Amino acid sequence: RMLQDISGIDVYDITFDDKDVLSLFSSPDVLGVTKEQIMCDTGTLGVPEFGTNFVIEMLKDTKPQSFAELVKISGLSHGTDVWLNNAKDLVDQKVVPFKEVIGCRDDIMVYLMQNGLKPLDAFKIMEFVRKGKPSFEKEEWIKWEQVMREGNIAEWYIESCKKIKYMFPKAHATAYIMMALRVAWFKVHYPIMYYSAYFSIRTADYDIEAMMNGYDAIKTRLVELKGKGYDTTNKESSILDVLQVALEMTARGFK
């Protein structure tokens, strides 16, 4: 809302296929900085849903190129036992490409129907899996496994379903990606507005002294805080996130 107000640009006019914006999710190059300068492998610092270490690691593993792949990542990052010890292993071991792993609950029903299962069975399996029932209603799950095997569903797919504890809905993931891409568009095309909105609205903790003294001071403080590891306090963790964005901003030539 603040970005719309200060720029005069209607956020609903922003498209979701801007190649420069999509490139942020695999590299910071479009920002005119290197990974080393900003101490981050992507250009997504401060972008809603994509600025945390967990999701940045996912982006490094998957290198998304499209809107659909970003929706999948959003689903994976909000599910439980969907990415770690599940889809990540399938991708790392090259069992299937990233675009084929289960990301959102809807993927299950659509995939099973496309592979010939009855729509009602596909729906019931999706509902069973998204609630994590295979791990505690084991006899019922054996029945559904049988239905899938009879429908020639791949063994890796059945095993992946079995591990899931909770799955995110695709419409919710899509709404998050639409918001993230609109914000990221400003980061690429109207950077000073992006940073002013970020520091005004998204942050509560500051190390104003380091931030006012420019790139070198920010980097020194960042390295110091990162060096504390598990001894970092909650407030320091919050400041760390802010300093990372401040480092990026100053590396881009703003102050």
Image (cartoon, rainbow, N blue to C red):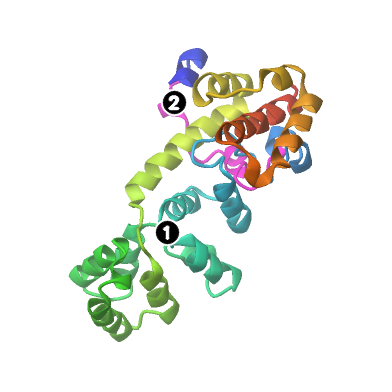
Up/down of 172 relative to 63, above or below: above
Which image quadrant: the N terminus?
Answer: top left
**Callout 2: few (<14), some (14-19), or many (20+) C-alpha neighbours within 10 Å?**
some
Which range of residues does the magenta coloring cover?
9-29
Residue sitting at x 31%, y 61%? 130
Up/down of 202 relative to 33, above or below: above
Which image quadrant: the C terminus?
Answer: top right
Up/down of 115 relative to 173, above or below: below
Residue sitting at x 40%, y 55%? 79
- Residue topped by disc 1: 103
Give the number of the mark in front: 2 or 1.
Answer: 1
3D distance between C-alphas at marks 2 and 1: 27 Å
**Callout 1: few (<14), some (14-19), or many (20+) C-alpha neighbours within 10 Å?**
many
Image-quadrant location for residue 244: top right
Extreme-right residue of the structure: 216
Q: Is residue 145 left or right of residue 247?
A: left
Up/down of 213 relative to 144, above or below: above
Can the viewer see residue 255 in this picture? no
Q: Is residue 119 left or right of residue 39?
A: left
User: Can residue 113 be found in the magenta stretch?
Assistant: no
Residue 95 locus on image (x, y percent):
54, 75
Tag 1: amino acid: Gly
Q: Nearer the viewer, residue 211 or 36?
A: 211
Q: Is residue 30 left or right of residue 25?
A: right
Mark 1 falls on what kind of element?
loop
- Residue topped by disc 2: 11
